[in-house]
């Protein structure tokens, strides 16, 4: 299993946009990606029951540690180039505030960014970074 996996809602327009952005800025290829609807997410849930079944939570798994919602974003940011990596310092804010902002975006994401008919198919160059 990969060392750094971002689990995301495969049919969420916002989530897919975030994954596309990560693919562009992650020049080192630090992350692999899997839809929450897929077999990789199911396998990880079997090992980590804290990973929710609901699709409104971004999950980041790094070397066996599971991060949810805003903490997932901040933990993943550590591996991005500057200036994006600086966003990890937002983790110093109380979780009640950062997760409230996360939940607000999660609540309106389909209305604003839409819902895809199916999970997006990665390009040939990106395919190796996506898990089932």
Image (tube, rainbow, N blue to C red):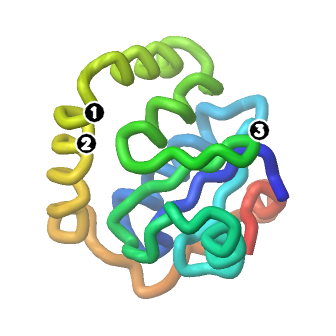
Q: Residue furthest bottom?
A: 117
Cα distance, mark 1 to mark 3? Answer: 28 Å
What residue is drawn where x is 39% and y is 78%? 116
For residue 21, side relative to residue 55 (left or right): right
What residue is drawn where x is 20% and y is 36%? 96
The total of numbered circles placed on residues is: 3
Label whose residue precedes the other's in the sequence (1 or 3):
3
- On residue 99, the disc is 2
| Residue holding disc 3 | 29
Where does residue 48 sit, x and y in percent of width and height?
62, 63
- On residue 95, the disc is 1
Labels 1 and 3 touching (C-beta < 8 A): no
What residue is drawn where x is 36% and y is 40%? 70
Q: SS at mark 3?
A: loop
Labels 2 and 1 touching (C-beta < 8 A): yes
Q: SS at mark 2?
A: helix
């Amino acid at each position: 299993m990969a060392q750094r996996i971002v689990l995301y809602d495969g049919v969420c327009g916002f989530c897919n946009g975030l994954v596309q952005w990560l693919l562009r800025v992650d020049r080192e290829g630090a992350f692999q990606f899997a839809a929450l609807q897929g077999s990789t997410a199911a396998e990880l849930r079997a090992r980590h029951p804290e990973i929710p079944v609901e699709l409104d939570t971004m999950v980041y798994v790094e070397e066996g540690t599971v991060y949810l919602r805003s903490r997932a974003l901040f933990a993943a940011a550590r591996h991005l180039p500057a200036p994006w990596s600086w966003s990890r310092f937002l983790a110093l804010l109380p979780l009640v505030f950062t997760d409230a902002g996360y939940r607000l975006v999660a609540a309106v994401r389909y209305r604003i960014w839409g819902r895809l008919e199916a999970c997006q198919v990665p390009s040939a160059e990106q395919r190796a970074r996506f898990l089932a």
